[in-house]
Image: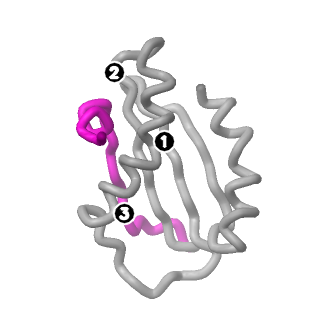
Amino acid sequence: MISAAQSQTEQIKKQSGGTYSDIAVEKGDNHTIIYKYTYAKDPGIEIDATALKPTLVKGMKPVIDGIKAMVPDVKIRVIYLKPDKTELANILITQSDTDAVN
C-alpha cells in the first residue's frame, strides 16, 4: 500500500505546480497511511482542518475503498506542513468517514 502511494508522489508534486516542496507517504501505527505535504513557500494562512476534511474524505474515499477489503480498519492521516516543518493541519480520515460519502 505504502509503496504504491509513494510511486504517485512525484506526479502529484508536478500537478501541484510547485505548491509543495515535498510529498511523503509513510506507514503509521494501527494501519494508518500518513500523507505529508510540505509547502514550498509559507502559505501565510492558517488551514481550517474542519472545513477541509469533507473535501479530503471525498478525495481519499477511493483509496480507502480499495484497501478496506485487505485492511478493514485502514485510516489515512493527512498532514500539511510549512517549509520549516511546523504543522498547519493534521486530519485523520477513517473508513466510517468515507462510508458516509454517497
**Region in magenta:** 84-102
- Circles 1, 3 touching at the beta carbon (< 8 Å): no
SS for callout 1: strand
Look at 30% across and 55% down and name the residue there: 54
In the image: residue 86, left or right of residue 54: right
> Residue 86 at x, y = what percent?
45, 68
Q: Residue furthest top?
A: 70
Assess whether residue 87 is covered by the magenta stretch.
yes
Look at 24% across and 62% down and name the residue there: 50
Counting labels gives: 3
Q: Whole-Å distance between the Cαs marked 1 and 3?
A: 13 Å
Between marks 3 and 2 in the image, the one whose residue lies nearer the viewer:
2
Q: Amino acid at mark 1?
A: Ile
Question: Residue 34 bears which disc, if any?
Answer: 1
Assess whether residue 71 is covered by the magenta stretch.
no
Is 35 rendered above or below residue 76? below
Q: Mark 1, residues whose alpha carbon is within 10 Å: few (<14), some, or many (≥20)? A: many
Q: Please tell me which of labels 2 and 1 falls first in the chain.
A: 1
> Residue 102 at x, y = what percent?
30, 40
Q: Whole-Å distance between the Cαs marked 3 and 2?
A: 23 Å
Is 41 rendered above or below residue 59? below
Image-quadrant location for residue 7: top right
Is 23 rendered above or below residue 28? below
Q: Amino acid at mark 2?
A: Asp
Q: Return the residue at label 2.
A: 73
Q: Amino acid at mark 3?
A: Ala
SS for callout 3: strand
Quadrant in the picture for the N terminus: top right
